[in-house]
Image (tube, grey):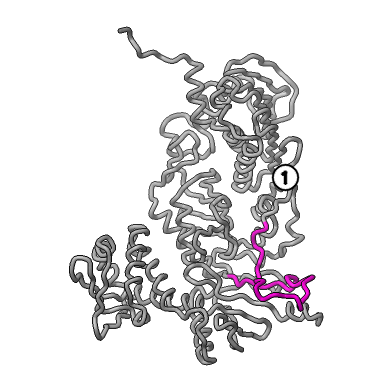
Amino acid sequence: MGNKVIILDGSTINKIAAGEVIERPASIVKELIENSIDAGSSRIFIEIRNGGKDLIKVTDDGIGMSSIDAELAFERHATSKIKGAEDLFFVKTLGFRGEALPSIAAVSEVEMITKRREDLLGTRIKLLNGIVTTKEETGSPDGTTIIVTKLFHNVPARKKFLKKETLESGYISDVINRLALANPSIHFKFINNDKIVLNSPGNNDLIHTIANIYGKDTAKNLVKVYISEGEYCLSGYISNPQLTRSNRNYQTYSINRRIIKDNIISKAVEDGYKTLLPVNRYPVVILNLDLPPNQVDVNVHPSKTEIRFNDEKQIYGFISEGISRILKEVTYIPRVKADYFKDKDVREYKIKEQLTINIEDEKKDDSFVDIREYYPESGDKIIGGGEKKEIKETDEDSLIQEEVLPDLIPIGQLFSTYILAQSSGAFFIIDQHAAHERIIYEELLEKRNEKRNYKQELITPIMIDLTHKEKNIIIENIDLIDELGFEIEEFGSNTILIRSVPYMLIDEVNKQLFIDIANQLESVSNEKEKEQEKILVMIACKSAIKAHDKLSHPEMEALIRELKKTKYPFTCPHGRPTIISMSLYEIEKRFKRK
């Protein structure tokens, strides 16, 4: 038998290496834009055709390159951004591996025109399959233009797996949007098949860029974040708890302006919301974390979107606690708009039609929007970093500061489920179950944190039969459960004996309760506090006043009084709203008094 091991030729090596960096047209766009950002550009224009399969063109006004550097840049591992391995611990640029341009050139035809400010003429260089075919002097503006065509023409297997044009264009648009959000000082213009898709302002005002990409309605419902502590600085915007999405596609995170994908940061942000978010709903997030380059490893993967922190726990705590503090200062009561009833005949109005608030309008503007047309110039609705400002009365949904739930006077109960109340200038509808859930949850949480006893001993212990698996889960976590106010003993092979329970559960002790606790303990993380908090949410739900429970006037007064004392009075522990309002102005407007 002959020898089987061979050394691959250079062309094959380049194609394999390109596969790690260039997954699809969006990968090329990302690499070229990052090069433009590293070149100090203030304007970056991107043009594509057919989802980037036929054309990708990126033009910037950066520093440009000399004739020698222009050709050398297409050699593998040629870079101006690091000198040696020790520099990897202090990377400040987005690129540094020297792989992007040679990888792109290996699977396409590339033309680059570049000029430095100090040069009279620029350089034009063309490559096919990584080999230079043309190099000449040319007149050109300062900066660099790179044109990519014939993508994957020599890698048919890769070309075959590209998606249809609309999907590939969508991937490219997403990349550009995120880079624009991470770099609001740069003017981005994106043209797809001769149509302007994005024209960001580049005025270093992030809220303008957000409005340009996600629309003015989203921008109106964001809260400013600025948290600085030691060497860490977190800045950007997060949505108020009422503006959520069904996935995390509207979350953009960057580290030192580098777009990244990191579970630690996203988990820290979402944990900062605690119980303010509904189940399976996610906030809109645009955040950048500045920290010393030597505290994060960006050399994990050729895509440079995966990172490792030196101290994940410290980063997590800094972000989670900071987000939580900000959300305590700014909370949100959904307000029913007067124009909801516009063009509706009251005589034909059916009770089954629900008052809803449209917060899902995600229409994007194709060109730069002057946010001053719809956003308070003073920025009153953007609050963060401990700063408190007065909130003006408007027809829009309101951001409400901490401890400003007004003094409410209950006036009745609707469908034995909702408390109707009024203040001096507004009408309120309170979900009695959601409000009571919030009250009980925070009471339980406070007592747990302060190690205060809230056990109620049962006169007669209760025996609960469970499956073997359920019983084992309960017994394995008996110390954790004991801290929540239960006293449990093992009693036979599949039976537990309940001697004490949290006092508010005295009438709710049954088999289903402990099945639910077992299921909760099986499904949550190994973090003790979070396991307990999720069980406390369940206990609060089971022990709270239910829908259709009739309340007396003193009971309604007591519920409102206790809700006002809570830290987060505007949502239940599951993230659903506890209260909505309609201003006197809106009511009078509907009755033609205004």
The quadrant of the picture occupied by the C terminus is bottom right
The amino acid on which the numbered mark 1 sits, given as a three-letter code, is Asn
At which x and y percent is residue 93?
Answer: 53, 38
Left or right of 252 on screen, residue 3:
left
Q: Nearer the viewer, residue 581 or 517?
A: 517
The boundaries of the magenta stretch are 332-361
Left or right of 483 on screen, residue 196:
right
**Residue at 59% from the left image edge and 24% from the top image edge:** 152
Determine whether 280 is above or below 489 in the image: above
Q: Nearer the viewer, residue 248 or 177?
A: 248
User: Is residue 399 visible from the viewing direction of this image?
Assistant: yes
Q: Label 1 neighbourhood size at 10 Å, few (<14), some (14-19), many (20+)?
A: many
For the stretch drawn in magenta, the main secondary structure is loop
| Residue furthest out toward the left | 492
At which x and y percent is residue 404?
Answer: 58, 78
At which x and y percent is residue 399?
Answer: 62, 70
- Residue 400 occupies quadrant: bottom right
| Residue furthest out toward the top | 2
Is residue 197 rendered magenta in the image?
no
Find disc 1 in the rendering and name its residue: 199
Determine whether 260 is above or below 26 in the image: below
**Residue at 78% from the left image edge and 81% from the top image edge:** 591
**Residue at 70% from the left image edge and 24% from the top image edge:** 119
Determine whether 504 is above or below 330 in the image: below
Q: Nearer the viewer, residue 269 or 540?
A: 540
Q: Nearer the viewer, residue 139 or 508?
A: 508
Q: Secondary structure at mark 1?
A: strand
- Residue 241 occupies quadrant: bottom right
Is residue 346 rendered magenta in the image?
yes
At which x and y percent is residue 229?
Answer: 47, 58
